[in-house]
Amino acid sequence: EHDPLAPAVLASWSDRLLDRVAGCLAAEPTAAGPLARGQFHLVRVSGPDEAVAFSDALAPEHLHVVTEAIAPEALSAYGSLFVGPWSP
């Protein structure tokens, strides 16, 4: 949002989701530059516990959680937390 070179990271335990997102990024012309610069990271985690540990280690400025498998109170290191598919 503030830094045009900031990375975007998707951590998921769903291979299907990660594959679909990778395909969408590859097909999106506006993603070519950020992809070439390594700004998109798709990370496979083993499940919700590893996702929480990964997120807390990353400590992102903006964290968007779109799963009912992770309770918001399980997360501790972020600037702003957005929960659910309809949060801004």
Image: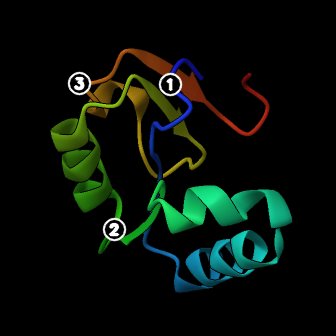
Classify residue 73 as left or right of residue 70: left
Q: Which residue is mark 3?
A: 76
N-terminal label among 3 and 2: 2
Residue beneath the point at 60% across and 45% down = 66
N-terminal label among 3 and 1: 1
Residues at badges 3 and 2 in contact (C-beta under 8 Å)?
A: no
N-terminal label among 1 and 2: 1
Spatial distance from mark 3 to mark 1, Cα to Cα?
A: 23 Å
Classify residue 31 as left or right of residue 41: right
Disc 3 crowd rating (10 Å Cα; few below 14, some 14-19, many 20+) is some
What's under tag 1, amino acid-wise?
Asp
Q: Position of residue 21 (x, y in %)?
A: 67, 71
Classify residue 55 as left or right of residue 84: left
In the rendered image, the vertical position of residue 16 relative to residue 46, given as above or below = below
What's under tag 3, amino acid-wise?
Ser
In the rendered image, the vertical position of residue 21 relative to residue 81, given as above or below = below
